[in-house]
Amino acid sequence: MLELRFHGRGGQGTVLAAKMLADVVLRSGKGECMAIPEFGVERRGAPVLAYARISDGPILLRTRIYEPDVVVVMDTAAAPSERVMDGLKPGGTILVNTEHDSAELAKTWPGFKVIAVPARQIALKHGLGTPAAPVLNTAVIGALCAALDIAGEEDLEAAIRGAVPIKIEENIAAALEAFAFIAERRPHAATRV
């Protein structure tokens, strides 16, 4: 079983990202997937967590994930305050929304596979959100699909069409650009457990 924990802020699409990942995995036929949101009555900008489990068989656990294989950092401002590294398994993968290079970030987090994707830049390029509040979910899911080799572009596009109510083509373009960004750098990509 592959367990993922998403760290973001309200309004960035963190919860929807976990749900879209589940849909992509199911469409790809590469296993079962469950998405679990965690948030309270917080407002836009407040820290949000979401979880996803991917398995070849039935998923019986319905709890938060304390020891993830993969941590997704949607907002680097959330990283220090939310203690995103807590419980990350040794050798685990960190996918982080940043314009910094993966090799540069690997020095910050030794012992982990670090995958950097400029999701904010990609989202804004495609008109998703504003500079103050970019909507990152589709770019992040595109990067995850390439990094973890869990689905191809067709399944990714279909999942976005089923989940996103507005700016569908823009969201698909952002996801495919992030997918290509990671696919071109696949030596830094993680492999499925």
Image: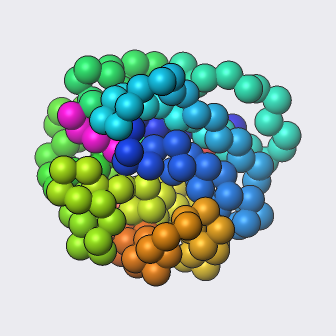
Residue 9 % position (x, y): 35, 37
Please give the name of the residue rendered at 48% of the width and 58% of the height, measured from the top-left corner: 141
**Residue 76 painted magenta:** yes
**From what the image shows, is residue 66 above or below residue 4?**
above
Quarter holding the C terminus? top right
How are the residues colored? Answer: rainbow
Looking at the picture, tell me which residue is in the foreground, 153 or 185.
Answer: 153
Boundaries of the magenta span: 73-77
Please give the name of the residue rendered at 73% of the width and 26% of the height, measured from the top-left corner: 62
Residue 144 % position (x, y): 47, 56
Q: Can residue 91 be seen in this view?
A: no
**From what the image shows, is residue 11 above or below residue 45?**
below
Please give the name of the residue rendered at 65% of the width and 41% of the height, measured from the top-left corner: 35
Task: Identify the image quadrant of residue 180.
Answer: bottom left
**Viewed as shown, does residue 86 lie left or right of 98?**
right
Toward the right, the furthest residue is 58
**From what the image shows, is residue 48 above or below residue 58?**
above
Examine the residues drawn in magenta and state their main secondary structure. Answer: loop
**Viewed as shown, does residue 141 lie left or right of 32?**
left
**From what the image shows, is residue 79 above or below residue 66?**
below
Looking at the picture, tell me which residue is in the foreground, 184 or 19.
Answer: 19
**Viewed as shown, does residue 33 lie left or right of 50?**
right
Residue 97 % position (x, y): 28, 50
Please give the name of the residue rendered at 45% of the width and 62% of the height, measured from the top-left corner: 138
Residue 59 % position (x, y): 80, 36
